[in-house]
Amino acid sequence: MTKGFLAGAFFAVLLSAVSVPVQADGDGAEARLKTLGLSLPPVSKPMANYVKAVRAGNLVFLAGHGECGPEFTTGKVGRDRTIEDGYASARNVGLCLLASLKAEIGDLDKVTRIVRVVGMVNATEDFTDHPKVVNGCSDLLVEVFGDKGRHTRAAVGMASLPSNITVEITMIAEVAD
């Protein structure tokens, strides 16, 4: 057996033991955020000539987000940051994405499905656990939206990200009229 296979098997066992709270069908996303003790940060303005969200029919496409606010995590996972630091950063980015989504649609209870998440991790060349980092956002989305928060996903490593941020994530959500 290879080390990669053993590490993958260990990770699979670890994940099966982790319990992510799932929203009850009758709870709304807004109420669930409060129950989780979470609040959405203010939406920041884009740093260039683009918008944070674009609605096309029932889909909302969210631009790449890093952590919002005056302080954010910087550095490469695998050198400057641990997987746990990256996970926390990705979770914070998820809150920023939800804030931008709410600003676009007015109420997170209009979300019918989180369709796609693409997580980019500022990582060293030899780092290979990008999915463990992006789980921070994915777990948050399932906690807030339940099964509607389960999505397709890509979790990839980058040689660098803007301002040396640790995580950048884009998202597509389906919303009701």
Image: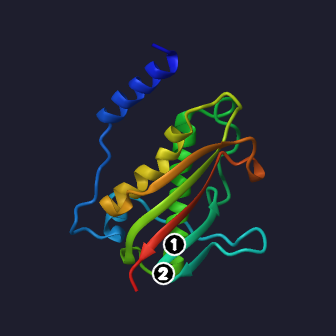
Total of numbered circles in the picture? 2
- Disc 2 marks which amino acid? Ile
Local secondary structure at mark 2:
helix
Q: Are marks 2 and 1 in contact (CB under 8 Å)?
A: yes
In percent of width and height, residue 143 lies at 35, 55
Residue 28 figure quarter = bottom left
- Disc 1 marks which amino acid? Leu
> Tag 1: Cα neighbours inside 10 Å, few (<14), some, or many (≥20)?
many
What residue do we see at 67% from left, 37% from top?
Answer: 123
Q: Which residue is mark 1?
A: 101
Q: Is residue 79 above or below residue 43?
A: above
In percent of width and height, residue 157 lies at 65, 41
Q: Which image quadrant: the N terminus?
A: top left
Q: Which residue is mark 2?
A: 105
What residue do we see at 50% from left, 15% from top?
Answer: 2
Horizontally, residue 13 falls left or right of residue 107, namely left
Residue sitting farthest toward the bottom: 177
In percent of width and height, residue 42 lies at 57, 70
Residue in the foreground of this view, choosing between 53 and 6: 6
